[in-house]
Image (spheres, helix red, strand yellow):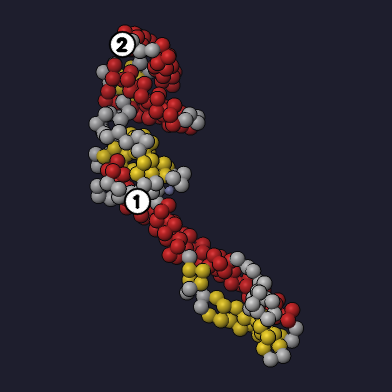
């Protein structure tokens, strides 16, 4: 990410510059309602600035982050940004305005699961980086060309759900299904999963990761049921551990996919 050389550029806001701006807009025939909004915006920025009243790009971005933190809606923030841009153009300081007009305006446009919200102010190899919101609710910053080329169509959740499908089975065993412990069977003679009659006894067994484990033969069916239940506990413990490992691996894989997307060639 590189930012353009605007860090040293600043504009001093004064009561005079703000009055001149409003007067110019009045002369243009702007409605009283819009004038109120323009006035409110420049005053809000002025009040936000420290004593020196120097407006720089960095402070402008801080101001916007501050509005986000305070819970202003996206629409409100977009309007504020639009109005302060107008002021900056008027005072001849367009260098520090938001989205300097060179980039294609993709605000509100949807690419797959992603909707472009606004430029972040950052750049990636000369490409404007946009704040995007994914249909899953995540937000992600992406260079515009990534979106426009169709190379990226989600925050990474699409890849994640795909990986989940691939990885959550082990030796033909659906781990999530193993965790659902339902000992009652409608097909077995005993009425219990993993408990079957063998000669005049009851045999307990459990199938896990493609292997049948025999847990002994018991005179009393109750004992066979208990043995099966103990084995099931161990199986659940093992499956839980495996699932945790898979979750970690998936998160790493997704992080790599997303990283590759944001830093990859454009
Ligand atoms: Zn997502």
Kindly identify the residue that appears in the image at 27 percent across and 46 percent down.
149
Say whether mark 2 is within 8 Å of ligand 1.
Answer: no
Observer able to see residue 263:
no
Secondary structure at badge 1 equals helix
Q: Residue furthest bottom?
A: 199
Which of the 4 image quadrants contains residue 81?
top left
Residue 234, given in percent of the width and then of the height, sits at: 61, 72
Decide which of 51, 160 is in the foreground and name it: 160
Q: Whole-percent x and y of residue 210? A: 51, 78
Q: Is residue 44 above or below residue 183?
A: above
Q: Residue at x 46, y 47 (%)?
A: 136
Residue 13 is labelled as none
Q: Earlier in the sequence, mark 1 or mark 2?
A: 2
Q: Is residue 19 visible?
A: yes
Q: Quick check: 110 above or below 237?
A: above
**Is the residue at mark 1 in contact range of ligand 1, meaning its CB lies under 8 Å from it?**
no
Q: Nearer the viewer, mark 1 or mark 2?
A: 2
**What separation in Å lies between label 1 and label 2 (alpha carbons)?**
48 Å
Q: Nearer the viewer, residue 26 or 245?
A: 26
| Label tally | 2
- Snapshot quadrant of residue 103: top left
Nearer-the-camera pick, 121 or 167: 167
Q: Residue at x 35, y 44 (%)?
A: 111
Q: Secondary structure at mark 2?
A: loop
Q: Mark 1 highlights which residue?
A: 259
* Residue occupying image coordinates x 38% and y 48%: 154
Nearest the camera: 122 or 83? Answer: 83
Position of residue 148 in the picture relative to residue 77 (left or right): left
Whether residue 36 is situated above or below residue 193 in the rendered picture: above
Q: Residue furthest front?
A: 187
Residue receiving disc 2? 28
């Amino acid at each position: 990410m590189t930012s353009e050389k605007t860090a040293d550029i600043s504009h001093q806001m004064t009561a005079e510059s703000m009055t001149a701006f409003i007067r110019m807009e009045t002369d243009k025939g702007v409605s009283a309602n819009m004038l109120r909004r323009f006035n409110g915006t420049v005053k809000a920025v002025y009040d936000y600035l420290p004593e020196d009243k120097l407006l720089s790009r960095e402070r402008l971005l801080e101001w916007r982050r501050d509005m986000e933190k305070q819970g202003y809606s996206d629409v409100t923030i977009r309007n504020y940004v639009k109005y302060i841009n107008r002021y900056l153009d008027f005072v001849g300081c367009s260098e520090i305005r938001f989205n300097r007009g060179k980039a294609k305006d993709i605000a509100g446009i949807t690419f797959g699961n992603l909707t472009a919200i606004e430029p972040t102010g950052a750049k990636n190899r000369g490409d404007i980086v946009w704040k995007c919101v994914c249909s899953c609710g995540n937000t992600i910053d992406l260079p515009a060309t990534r979106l426009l080329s169709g190379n990226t169509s989600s925050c990474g959740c699409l890849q994640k759900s795909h990986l989940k499908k691939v990885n959550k089975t082990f030796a033909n065993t659906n781990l999530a299904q193993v965790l659902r412990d339902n000992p009652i069977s409608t097909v077995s003679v005993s009425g219990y999963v993993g408990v079957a009659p063998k000669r005049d006894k009851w045999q307990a067994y459990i199938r896990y990761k493609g292997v049948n484990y025999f847990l002994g033969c018991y005179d009393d069916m109750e004992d066979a049921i208990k043995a099966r239940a103990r084995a099931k506990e161990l199986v659940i413990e093992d499956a839980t551990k495996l699932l945790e490992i898979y979750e970690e691996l998936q998160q790493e894989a997704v992080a790599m996919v997303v990283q590759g997307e944001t830093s990859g060639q454009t």
